[in-house]
Image (cartoon, helix red, strand yellow):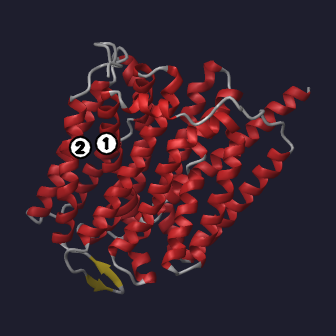
Amino acid sequence: MLRFHKYYVHLFLIALGVVLYFFANFHRVAVPGAVFGLLQQKLGVSAPYITALGASFMYTYAVSQIFMGRMVERYGGLRIIALGALFFTAGALLFPNTHSMPLLYLSRVMSGFGAGCFYLSLVRELERCIPDRNFGVSLSITIFLGYLGSFAANAPFVWFIERFGLFHVLDYTGFVILAVSVLFILTGARFQLTSINTGRHFELDSYRHVLCNRYNICLFLFGALNYALMYVLQTVVGKKFLEDICMFSSEKAAWVLSAMSVISAVSSMGLAFLSRYFGGRKIIFFKISAVISVVAFVFVTLSLIFSFRSGLLVSMLFCCLAAVATMSPLLVVVISEVNPHSVSVTATGIMNALFFFSVGIMGNLTGFMMNLFPAYEVNGILVYGRNSYLAVFLPLLLFSFAELYFAFRLEEPGKKKLNQK
């Protein structure tokens, strides 16, 4: 009876962790993506300062992934979720209550570190709590619920902002995060945690082994570019582009980005089934994804060059990018196939880190390129013209060709000895 009770308490803690993971995705996408223009209006700063709010979150999240796998293996997922909840709550409460740029960046750094604690911790706790036959389904549901945070960060978020104001809405979400974090910590304090695994240490050899594998390098670079090219649209510049160039209202542009989130979540869940249907092949999907990325960015760039402002076309291209930029389930499988079990978690952490370093770099680059040409003010909001966005999308187009190059350097695992250095 006691074991039965413990199992359900464990499930409840995991559920609370999933709620925090939902809000981590919400904060990752909402700022600055959904509120780029509003933040400029409220803070009175140029584009690079706004894009840096997203980049500071991404860089911190990326750095945390490098060592987070080892921390989870040593201390257990529940302890790491509790640590992340403290930092994430502090950042979520600080951001809407200050207009100081240094404090805003500090809040994003705290939120980024806290958010980085949740995913791998949830994976570990699901492994402990869920039978093997149900683990894959449970993990897919967890990822899907997390992606719903990205959905909520666009159209629903904008809807609430228009009625209650930006900082009031962020305040309310901060207090919800605080309540969930307190409930998690209080419940966890009464739960028998796993003992600390003192045999797990931070070993540089495992990182060296991963990074000396040439196949890993191509795989990581493809994955990072594939993820970042879509995510920089979703979290930084996509909504602003739809408003400034395609003349969408804030709410209409937000619905496009929400649709991208839903498409991304559904595509992520369907990839594993498609791979199994095609005999376990995975690399073919990477190559198809890279080709679609290049085509999408070519069309967006050409539409800017020839001043063809079709909101429908751009929305369709953005949604196509969302459908093919969710390769994580297949990437993790390939990593496990081409790396020894002892370093597969380390390899996954490095890949996740590169994902978010790439988003941060592209976010910073986007802000710099937008600022090369003067913006004009409409109703207190800065609007950027065709030249600004052409300066943004030309580098993104080059990145898409780099993604294509690395995709076609990859072969299906098993065709040759992949672990050869």
- The image's mark for residue 226 is 1
Name the image quarter holding residue 258.
bottom left
Q: Is residue 143 visible?
A: yes
The residue positioned 40% from the left and 24% from the top of the image is: 334
The residue positioned 55% from the left and 49% from the top of the image is: 116
For marks 1 and 2, the one nearer the N-term is 1
Q: Residues within 10 Å of mark 2 (few under 14, many from 20)?
A: many
Q: Nearer the viewer, residue 300 or 14?
A: 14
The secondary element bearing badge 1 is classed as helix
Quadrant placement of the N terminus: top right
Q: How many marks?
A: 2
Quadrant placement of the C terminus: top left
Apparent side of residue 346 relative to residue 421 in the rendered image (left or right)? right
- The image's mark for residue 293 is 2
Q: Residues within 10 Å of mark 1 (few under 14, many from 20)?
A: many
The residue positioned 34% from the left and 86% from the top of the image is: 379
How far apart are labels 1 and 2 at the CA level? 8 Å
Q: Position of residue 256 (x, y in %)?
A: 36, 57
Q: Nearer the viewer, residue 112 or 196?
A: 196
Name the image quarter holding residue 93.
bottom right
The secondary element bearing badge 2 is classed as helix
Kind of residue at disc 1: Asn
Residue 46, compared with residue 267, is above or below; it is below
Residue 145, compared with residue 252, is above or below; it is above
Q: Position of residue 385 (x, y in %)?
A: 20, 74
Q: Are marks 1 and 2 in contact (CB under 8 Å)?
A: yes
Q: Is residue 76 visible?
A: no
Apparent side of residue 344 relative to residue 235 in the rendered image (left or right)? right
The furthest residue to the right? 1
Q: Position of residue 242 (x, y in %)?
A: 29, 65
Kind of residue at disc 2: Ser
